[in-house]
Amino acid sequence: MSRPPPLPSISVLTPSLNQAPFLEEALLSVLGQAYPDLEYRVLDGGSTDGSLEIIRRYQGRLAGWRSRPDGGQAAALAEGFAESRGEVLAYLNSDDAYLPGALRAAGEAFAADPDLDLVYGDIVFVDAQGRPLAIDVLPTFSWEDLRRVCVIPQQAAFWRRRAYEGVGGIDPDFHFCMDYDLFLRIAEAGRVRHLPRLMARFRWHAAAKSSVAKATWDAENLLLQRRYLGRAGWSRTDWLRMKWLTARQLGAIAGRTLQGERFPCWTPARWQRLARRKLREGLGTGPVAV
């Protein structure tokens, strides 16, 4: 019998700033993956809330960490990836968490297909206490979908270093959409695959960037629309395609349920009205953009 191909080395970064209530869970979700060749680094931006005590508790299991003011999340990630050594790269924000087996699923996908550049799975939105709010279960990858909306959840995405370096890496000029910008450039030049499994938790809470930086997100998203659609804003055709994406997502949930998969909740994140209400309830205040 032939041996399975060797798993690639994976480097994971966690950028963080004053996220002590959630940081330990994020760290343990990475360290508990039991991946055979993992490099894990924590990039703290100068926290003052007890985060450093948590990081020091696990520093013996980290490839490295630092705590100092930096140029923002994108700049910190660019620095961290430049210092890392893994064949496959990813980052997990300090208020999110991997689900068991996420790294091995990604590693096995890359090992089985040497031409693959990026893989991603599905995510579950949770509130500050970890209670499920919505699921982002996705259909097969489509470039036409990605041109219009980020259908690749950053929390469950992994990409090859060669692809990352080939497109110029993280753009530090972005403050919110640095992941979407990177995924667009990798997908335009290479091969992307969706893994039909839940791989991460995305925490929705009042202090999250997703909750407080909507104006920045809007501006950066419009920039990417102009770049990849040739216009700012969606046409009627774009809206209809997003309705089709929602229908395909519901089909994916139904199909996987019939195959025996059990989901933590039944609210599809891209079923806009219901998902927004659920996320507002979880956040407790303010507008929500899904």
Image (cartoon, rainbow, N blue to C red):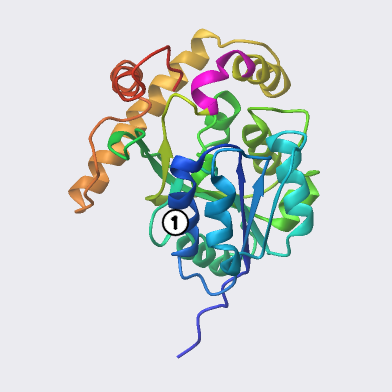
Residue at the image position 71 percent from the left and 44 percent from the top: 77
Residue at the image position 47 percent from the left and 65 percent from the top: 104
* Residue labelled with disc 1: 29
Q: Between 88 and 95, which is closer to the camera in this rendering? A: 95
Q: Position of residue 217 (x, y in %)?
A: 60, 20
Residue 90 lies in magenta, yes or no? no
Residue at the image position 52 percent from the left and 30 percent from the top: 145
- The amino acid pointed to by label 1 is Ser
Q: Is residue 107 above or below residue 125?
A: below
Location of residue 147 (image quadrant) = top right
Dominant SS type (magenta): helix
Q: 92 left or right of 114?
A: left
Q: Position of residue 198 (x, y in %)?
A: 37, 49
Name the image quarter holding the N terminus: bottom left
Name the image quarter holding the C terminus: top left
Describe the element under mark 1 as helix, strand or loop: helix
Q: Please report the bounds of the magenta region as a residue range.
A: 209-216
Q: Between 263 and 1, which is closer to the camera in this rendering? A: 263
Q: Position of residue 55 (x, y in %)?
A: 57, 55
Q: Is residue 33 above or below residue 225?
A: below
